[in-house]
C-alpha cells in the first residue's frame, strides 16, 4: 500500500478543486497518504463545527416562549427550517422526543393545552406531531382574523361603511 502513494496523490490532485487542491498540493514528496491525512484534518474540523452550530441552533429554542398563537406559528415555521438545516448537516433527523420537548417549551398556553396528551406515534418521528401543531395553529390564526369577537355573534358585526336605504311597507 505504501508504494501506491503516488497513485493516490495523482488521483486526489486530479479530482480536487479550489482549497482542497491546495491542501493536497501541500503534501511533501507526492505522498498521497499525507495528502489524505491533511484533507481529513482540514475538513473534519469544519464539519464538526457545523454540527455543533446546528445542535446549538436547536437548543436555543428552549429559551423561547410564545405569548399568543401568532408567535407560536412564527416560531414553529422557524423551527421547521432549523430542523431541515440540522438534518442536512448532520445527516439524520434530531430525536423525536427532543423535538417534542422543544415544541412544548415554545408553544403559547392555549396551543399547549390543546397538544397536552398527544404523543409521538412513531419511534423518533416528530413529523406527525409538528404537522398536528401547525394544523392547529393555522386554524387558530385563521379564526383570529375575525375582529371584534366571534364571527357568529350578531352584535359584533362591524359597519363596513355601506349605506343601505330603509325599506318601509
Image: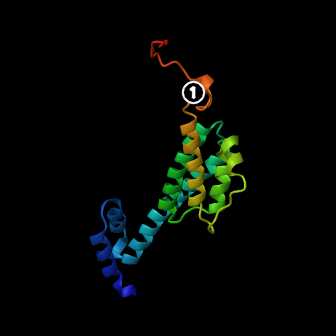
| Rendering coords of residue 61 (x, y %) | 62, 47
- The image shows residue 47 at horizontal and vertical percentages of 49, 61
Q: Is residue 32 left or right of residue 166?
A: left
The residue sitting at 56% across, 54% down in the picture is 131
Q: Which residue is mark 1?
A: 147
Picture residue at 58% right of the left edge, 34% below the top: 144
Residue 169, x across and y down, in percent: 49, 13
Relative to the observer, which residue lies in front, 167 or 58? 167
- Horizontal relation, residue 124 to residue 85: left or right: right
Whole-percent x, y for residue 121 in the image: 63, 65
Q: Closest to the observer: 43 or 32?
A: 43
Nearest the eye: 117 or 76: 117
Front position in the image: 122 or 168: 168
Outermost residue toward the front? 169
Q: Residue 148: name its quadrant.
A: top right
The quadrant in which residue 75 appears is: top right
> Can the viewer see residue 126 in this picture?
yes
Residue at x 35% of width, y 63% of height: 20
Give neighbour class at mark 1: few <14, some 14-19, many 20+ (Cα, 10 Å): few
Rendered position, 60 above or below 49:
above
The N terminus, quarter of image: bottom left
User: How many numbered badges does the structure rendering display?
Assistant: 1
Mark 1: secondary structure: loop
**Is residue 165 rendered to the left or right of residue 111?**
left
Q: How is the image coloured?
A: rainbow
Q: Which residue sits at x=62%, y=66%?
A: 124
* Residue 56 visible from this viewpoint: no
Amino acid at each position: 500500500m505504501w508504494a501506491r502513494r503516488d497513485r493516490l496523490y495523482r488521483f486526489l490532485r486530479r479530482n480536487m478543486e479550489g482549497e482542497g487542491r491546495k491542501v493536497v498540493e501541500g503534501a511533501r514528496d507526492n505522498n498521497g497518504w499525507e495528502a489524505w491525512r491533511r484533507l481529513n484534518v482540514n475538513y473534519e474540523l469544519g464539519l464538526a463545527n457545523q454540527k455543533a452550530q446546528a445542535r446549538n441552533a436547536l437548543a436555543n429554542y428552549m429559551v423561547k416562549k410564545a405569548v399568543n398563537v401568532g408567535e407560536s406559528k412564527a416560531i414553529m415555521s422557524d423551527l421547521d427550517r432549523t430542523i431541515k438545516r440540522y438534518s442536512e448537516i448532520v445527516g439524520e433527523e434530531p430525536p423525536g422526543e427532543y423535538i417534542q420537548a422543544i415544541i412544548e417549551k415554545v408553544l403559547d398556553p392555549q396551543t399547549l393545552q390543546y397538544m397536552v396528551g398527544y404523543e409521538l406515534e412513531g419511534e423518533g418521528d416528530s413529523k406527525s406531531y409538528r404537522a398536528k401543531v401547525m394544523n392547529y395553529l393555522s386554524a387558530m390564526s385563521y379564526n383570529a382574523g375575525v375582529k371584534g369577537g366571534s364571527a357568529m355573534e350578531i352584535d359584533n358585526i362591524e359597519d363596513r361603511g355601506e349605506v343601505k336605504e330603509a325599506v318601509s311597507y
